[in-house]
Image (tube, helix red, strand yellow):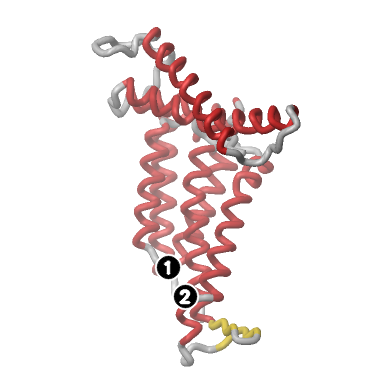
Amino acid sequence: MIIAPEIGDRQLDSPLGRASPLVKLGVGLVWLGFLLVAVDPRPAVVLILASAAGCLGLGRVPLRQFARAWVPFVAAALGVLLVNTALGAANLDPANPTLLRVGPLRVTGAALAVGVALGLRVLAVAAVGVAFALTTEATRLADALVQQARVPERFAAGALAAHQAVPRLALDLATLRQARRIRGLRGDMHPRLLLALLILAVRRAGRVALAMDARGFARGTRPSRYRVVAWSSADLVVGAAGLGALALAALSLAIPAPG
């Protein structure tokens, strides 16, 4: 089931939580751009450690919540590592030294290196998303887009409503399946479930549209601000820390590889 991460007051009051979502989004995009061009696994390790330190230190994310958020991404990275190690093209080259042989399967050091590099890149990309999701409220992100990035209010509010609708759809699906079991029907996936889910989504979208219209999102009007998002010193701290981590990742390329 899709569940939005819970962000407590301790995380929102942290330097990473007080920083503008646009600063965190900008740092994350720069990190992702660097990971696209950096094939070496060492920058990925640096950015993973920097993200973990930022979440636990600057973001004050509880260790249990941080570990729980990482579980699916670690599993995905291990899958990428195993698949690319076992089925890598480098295993077909007889010049590469053999590390392991199980029946017809041959694993070489070159294939293992490729698998490790790709797995670490998956974790590094996930680290950016985990740090952002665990320290950023969706409503604050929408406010920052409108007030600081000058995004139209209708677009930002619509995106926020869509973001909040995804967990509700999962809850609606679970409720519909339980209702079918109560009536003595099978609770597995059925076309009628999808039709009922579509009807609920359309009804909720209509209520959201009426609520947005009542709050002044009609064309030609400017809704009032519930809270003001302004630039602060936390933005400088987070921006400088993000750029510093990126510089360390770039400098790691100058370290000679072992062996």
Residue occupying the far left of the picture: 220
* Residue at 33% from the left image edge and 25% from the top image edge: 155
Percent coordinates x, y for residue 123 in the rendering = 52, 56
Say the numbered circle drawn on residue 60: none
Q: Is residue 151 shown above or below 60?
A: above
* Residue at 40% from the left image edge and 66% from the top image edge: 39
Q: Amino acid at mark 1?
A: Asp
Q: Which residue position is annotated with label 2?
A: 257
Q: Secondary structure at mark 1?
A: loop
Residue occupying the far top of the picture: 214
* Residue at 65% from the left image edge and 84% from the top image edge: 102
Residue occupying the far bottom of the picture: 95
Answer with left or right where residue 82 lies relative to residue 158.
Answer: right
Answer with left or right where residue 153 lies relative to residue 178.
Answer: left
Percent coordinates x, y for residue 148 in the rendering = 32, 26
Nearest-to-viewer mark from 2 and 1: 1
* Residue at 55% from the left image edge and 28% from the top image edge: 196
Residue nearest the viewer, comparing 180 with 233: 180
Q: Amino acid at mark 2?
A: Ala
User: Along the polypeptide, which appears first: circle 2 or circle 1?
Assistant: 1
Is residue 187 shown to the viewer in this render?
A: yes
Q: Cβ–Cβ below 8 Å for labels 2 and 1? A: yes
Q: Is residue 211 shown above or below 71?
A: above
Percent coordinates x, y for residue 35 in the rendering = 39, 57
Number of other residues with Cα within 10 Å of mark 1, as a class: few under 14, some 14 to 19, many 20 or more? some
Q: Which residue position is annotated with label 1?
A: 40
Percent coordinates x, y for residue 8 in the rendering = 61, 28
Q: Is residue 77 shown above or below 55?
A: below
Q: Quadrant of residue 11?
A: top right
Q: Is residue 255 shown above or below 15?
A: below
